């Protein structure tokens, strides 16, 4: 199955930092997604909006409403659970405080884990997250696990300081759940490929601004944004492509 992963939209009505038009960036990415074969799901892994207001979520909803395929949302540290639930009540939110979701797609299952710590930039896997995972994880289906902050370092000091904590709890849980095949994250505003607890781990870039890959203070750059396309055969393999949001002409090779 084909899953398109967007992340870190930071959607707002005014340019972010005075120079990043996140609305234009999202529209550009969605145009490219719509120009290709439709996915089974559009997954957006957190920091959906910039300030967590209902007005921003309504703006996001207006952009997603006409999509000819389903979408699933996951909160990040810039999001607010109450506003997310209010504007997107049809999402399959968990019944507890967390905004988690379980989605069964074909022969596989996606578990969307809310790792938000209100008022903090870093995330956490603690007892509530593990309890939800225990209850939601199927015993006999392949699983992809998604969360906003990655539970491992990416080599950018400013981002490593605000990654997901409680990684030992998550690693212990994964050790007991062999059907979880991979971990999908956002938060870093760059494409990163690694592994965690013996599973492939993929971090999606932002369609807007990227975090600068450099030593020194945390900084952003207007390098081209993008998204990930996951071609998942549950129980067999996860194949991931990075796709720049800006479309360029295609030139057929001539022999």
Image: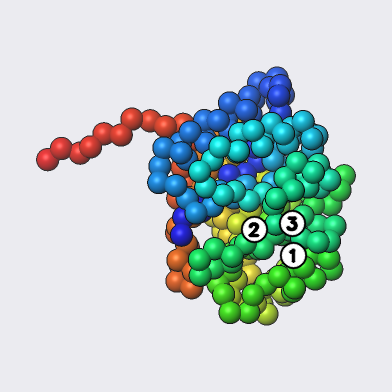
Q: Residue 167 has which mark?
A: 1
Q: Which residue is mark 2?
A: 146
Q: Residue 93 has which mark?
A: 3
**Local secondary structure at mark 3:** loop
Q: Are circles 1 and 2 on residues that touch, CB within 8 Å?
A: no
Residue at 61% across / 34% down in the picture?
63
**Local secondary structure at mark 1:** helix
State the residue in front, 148 or 75: 75
Residue at 67% across / 63% down in the picture?
102
Looking at the image, residue 55 lies above or below residue 40: above
Foreground tag (3 vs 2):
3
Can residue 38 be seen?
Answer: yes
Can residue 159 be seen?
Answer: no
Tell me the quarter of the picture where residue 134 sits.
Answer: bottom right
State the residue in front, 56 or 192: 56
Looking at the image, residue 4 lies above or below residue 194: above
Gap in angstroms between the C-alphas marked 1 and 2: 14 Å
Residue at 45% across / 66% down in the picture?
233
Gap in angstroms between the C-alphas marked 3 and 1: 23 Å
Q: Earlier in the sequence, mark 1 or mark 2?
A: 2
How many residues crowd mark 3 within 10 Å: few (<14), some (14–19), many (20+)?
many
Q: Earlier in the sequence, mark 3 or mark 2?
A: 3
Residue 251 horizontal/vertical position (percent): 26, 34
């Amino acid at each position: 199955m084909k899953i398109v992963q967007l992340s870190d939209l930071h959607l707002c009505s005014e340019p972010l930092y005075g120079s990043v038009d996140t609305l234009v960036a999202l529209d550009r990415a969605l145009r490219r997604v719509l120009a290709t074969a439709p996915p089974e799901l559009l997954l957006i892994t957190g920091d959906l909006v910039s300030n967590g207001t209902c007005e921003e979520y309504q703006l996001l909803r207006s952009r997603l409403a006409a999509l000819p395929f389903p979408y699933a949302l996951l909160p990040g540290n810039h999001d607010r659970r109450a506003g997310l639930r209010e504007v997107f009540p049809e999402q399959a939110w968990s019944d507890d405080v967390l905004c988690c979701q379980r989605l069964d797609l074909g022969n596989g299952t996606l578990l969307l884990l809310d790792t938000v710590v209100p008022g903090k930039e870093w995330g956490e896997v603690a007892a509530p997250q593990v309890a939800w995972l225990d209850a939601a994880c199927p015993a006999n289906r392949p699983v992809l696990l998604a969360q906003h902050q990655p539970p491992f370092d990416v080599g950018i000091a400013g981002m490593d300081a605000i990654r997901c904590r409680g990684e030992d709890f998550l690693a212990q849980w994964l050790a007991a759940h062999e059907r979880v095949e991979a971990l999908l994250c956002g938060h870093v505003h760059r494409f990163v490929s690694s592994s965690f607890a013996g599973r492939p781990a993929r971090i999606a870039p932002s369609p807007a601004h990227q975090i600068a890959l450099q030593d020194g203070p945390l900084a952003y750059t207007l390098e081209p944004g993008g998204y990930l396309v996951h071609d998942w055969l549950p129980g067999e393999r996860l194949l991931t492509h990075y796709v720049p949001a800006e479309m360029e002409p295609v030139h057929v090779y001539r022999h």
